[in-house]
Image (spheres, helix red, strand yellow):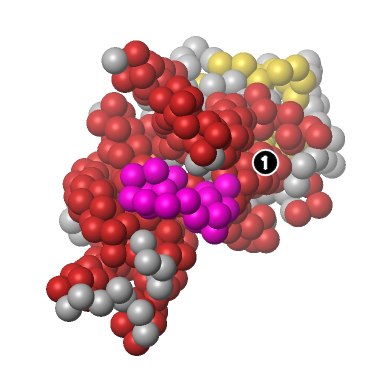
Amino acid sequence: MRLAGLLAALFCWAVLAAPPAAAHVDVLGSSPADGTRLTTPPTQVSIRLSENVGVQKDALRVEDVHGEVVSQGRVTQGATAEELTIRLEPDLPDGTYLVHYAVVSTDSHPVRGGFAFVVGDGPLMNAGGAVSNADGTDTAVDVLTRVVRWVGYAGVALAGGLVFLLCCRPTRDSVGQGAVRAGCVVITVTGVLALGLEGAYVTGAGLSRVFAPDLLANTLESAYGKLLILRVIAAVVLMVIARRMLSTDAGREKPAHTNTAIIAGFVVLLSSAAAGHAITTKVMFVSLLADLSHYGAMAVWIGGVVQLALLAGHEDMAVALTRFSPIAKVSVAVVVLSGVLMTASYLGSVQALWSSTYGVLLLGKTAGFVVLLALADRCRVAVREGIAGGTTLVGVRTEALRRVLVTEVVIAAAVLGIAAVVATTGTPG
């Protein structure tokens, strides 16, 4: 009961700590408006957003036509929480001024653009993106960010194999344990890399600015940065606890270790869900719970499949697969139900399935999932027939089974790759 209460408290904290948000932040307007000609210089510049993103350092910058910065002081919230404002130098001379903005939505998507206004006489210069929502992310940084997210998902799946080792494997297995530890290491490393990449991703800087001290400091001040720190710490704790749980010397401490592992794993999952699309819906509690369930069930299922692939040909195979089958069925059911709920929350309409990038990616992810189900069923039938025939799954049957399981792992990796792209793509809903 105490464990359930703690997990519920962590979940409620994630819901209450996240500000309400739209599908992704939009710039609704500015003051002065783009293209405005003023007779007297303004004292400040502001932009109005579709959501409260909090006060973000360097969110606004105003320059003259020579590139000299004429804004001063810190960015502050204006009359409403959705408005960001920065003061200007007093008595600006006549001329054109360019305003650049760069903000990050609550689901970590960057939005950058600019607009221009002119004081007094003279031509109005183009800001190159007036009141636009172009992200302008460096291509290399964008690709690397998605790859790191993909590898991070794979790490969570590998770590999810801990459930298989504890519930399904009758004997100890150093290879399977190594896969779980590798998953925890991958989660840790990708969390650190994500911290370094986020600053460059948000500002549009190149690879040379990854882990730049000023950008890293900005990331650490953000909610996303704090969630990444929490994720790294939880992954390290999970790695230490998993090693003890899987050792025979720590058998009498297993109940306490199990509770700690559950909490650490929950934090890893929650830190990802709370930094994604789940917190951008109107019913945040439901979507966050669905995302958390989807992510966790995926880890248990795919982690088990990886363990089975490593186990192919071993005498424990039949027993382990028989024990894993009900766990896999529940995991698949949770993945399907939570996936349907998330799709309804994020898409907004059925038409968006084929008319939006997010919808098309979702269809690709679903197709991969269906193939995984077919392969899993083929594997289950092969083992059932082997047991009925009195075989120990050796020879040709073992090789065939291994090929099916390896194919499952490869397709699962592809599905996780699509999921990584989906996570960094704006939702149409």
Estimate the x, y position of residue 313 in percent, counting from the top left: 40, 73
Estimate the x, y position of residue 129 in percent, counting from the top left: 59, 49
Residue 61 visible in this rendered orientation of the protein: yes
Q: Is 125 situated above or below 416?
A: above
Between 213 and 35, the one lying in front of the other is 213
Q: In the image, what residue occupies the spot 77% across and 42% down?
A: 211
Q: In the image, what residue occupies the spot 45% across and 22% down?
A: 256
Which quadrant would the N terminus be assigned to in this image? top left
Q: Is 44 situated above or below 22?
A: above
Which quadrant would the C terminus be assigned to in this image? top left
**How would you rate the neighbour count of disc 1 (Cα within 10 Å): few for under 14, some for 14-19, many for 20 or more?**
some
Residue 298 visible in this rendered orientation of the protein: no
Badge count:
1
Q: Which residue is most to the left?
A: 388
Picture quarter containing residue 122?
top right
Between 119 and 266, the one lying in front of the other is 266
Picture quarter containing residue 200?
top right
Q: Is 328 situated above or below 41?
A: below
Q: Is mark 1 on a helix, strand or loop?
A: helix
Dot 1 corresponds to which residue?
Answer: 192
- Name the side, left or right, on which 1 lies relative to 174: left
Q: In the image, what residue occupies the spot 33% across and 33% down?
A: 288
Q: Is residue 173 magenta?
A: yes
Q: Main secondary structure of the magenta part?
A: helix
**Magenta part of the chain:** 161-181
Q: Is residue 89 magenta?
A: no
Q: In the image, what residue occupies the spot 35% across and 79% down?
A: 394
